[in-house]
Image (cartoon, rainbow, N blue to C red):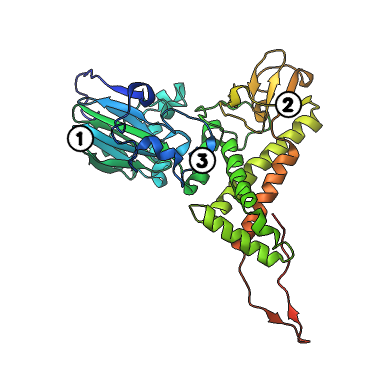
Amino acid sequence: VETGSEEVVVDYANDLNSKRFGSGFEHDPESSWNLNKLHTQPRSLLKEIQCDIQGVTHPWTYLGSLFTSFCWHTEDHFLYSINYMHKGHGKTWYGIPSTSAEQFEKAMKGFMPERFKKSPDLLYQLVSLLSPSFCLEQDVEVFHTVQKEGEFIVTFPNAYHGGFSHGLNCAEAVNFATPEWLAFGSQAMDKYHNKKGAGAGGLRGGKRSDIFAHDQLLYHLGSKLSKIVLRNKEKLAGKRESPSDLHVAIKEALARDLPYNPAKFVGSLLREYNRSARMELHLRKWLMHDLRVPVMEKVTYPNADPPLCCVCKCMPYFSYVVCRNCVKVTCPHHAFAQCDCKADAKVLALVVSDKGISSMENFIQSVKKSCNFQVLSTTTTTNGAKADPAPAPTP
């Protein structure tokens, strides 16, 4: 890369389906380090996707040789990743923290401006290598390590990484998500689909396709909280007369049943869900009331998979738009970017009702109040009467 040596062709078998070709963890399937089981672990958010995605919930296998390279990239949806070297020669890794991601992208575009003009999504094509030395010269933080046989490498959200193998080797890698990832997932959606700041219906092409519906994951995480409350309904039933006792009981149930800090998780979930829900309801109002687009309610997805918007490549979960003339599908945001057909040719298909979206938002909000509830000592009023804690909403 740095010296411009003569072209070298090497063999590399990458992104091999471990279900089809085999996993290196099959000899010890019960191991806690088995990457095939990572998405089912208690702290994993990806099990709430409720479907299998090769390379994300199940590992890909990689067979490398001398100089086989993986170009600079971040993981899909800015997820974490974990890579295990089963056998063979080492692998050089270069990593750039998320705090330097923007500076790195600026350096890439400055180094090859003409290529970016022709391919604005070049960073997502996994075909570009840029010297780590050049990155350092451009004030980009770059870290280096060599992964050896029997070692794991973990990459963090929105952290660019790349590298090459020193010889024949075999590795396996998979993604994962913890509660700390939620905000990064939303950032990835903004970056991939470039909707931020665009007018409703504006033509904004997608840079990278979703591999799962982000809003669906948020909604399922809210449902997970609901299931915890329902499992404890008998214990909570006797607390309804006292808002403070009810808050404490819900807080204890969440602390017992959630494998991570309830207050931080629920706070992050509420922030990201509110963001998605309010945008969805805003777009529905625009389509249904301002433009009079026909509506179809209680729609389900074919094969339970949300469609891909033909404009921005996102996977809309709450609703989507179909043009009956063109038979094209878009997210609500790009309802009129797909074709020139009039509003009466479009159909807004509602998967989750307005009430369902708002009810989930209100529920997560009430759970957050329970998580943040502090037991106050009883106070006395000026006339000597005891003052009760202020009532709070019941989830």
| Picture coordinates of residue 10, whole percent (x, y) | 23, 19
> The C terminus is located in which quarter?
bottom right
Quarter of the image where one finds residue 219:
top right
> The N terminus is located in which quarter?
top left
Location of residue 248 with respect to 91 vertically, above or below: below
Q: What residue did someone put label 2 on?
A: 348
- Compare marks 1 and 2 and give the one earlier in the sequence: 1
Q: Amino acid at mark 1?
A: Gly
Q: What residue did someone put label 1 on?
A: 90
* Cα gap from disc 1 to disc 3, whole angstroms: 31 Å
- Compare marks 1 and 3 and give the one earlier in the sequence: 1
Along the viewing direction, whichever of 192 and 327 lies nearer the viewer:
327
Location of residue 316 with respect to 391 vertically, above or below: above
Q: Secondary structure at mark 2?
A: strand
Q: Which mark is residue 185?
A: 3
Q: Secondary structure at mark 3?
A: helix
Q: Is residue 91 visible?
A: yes
Q: Amino acid at mark 2?
A: Leu
| Picture coordinates of residue 108, whole percent (x, y) | 38, 33
- Compare marks 2 and 3 and give the one earlier in the sequence: 3
Q: Secondary structure at mark 1?
A: loop
Which residue of the protein is positioned furthest toward the front in this rendering?
Answer: 234
* Cα gap from disc 1 to disc 2, whole angstroms: 53 Å
**Left or right: 84 as drawn, with respect to 98:** left
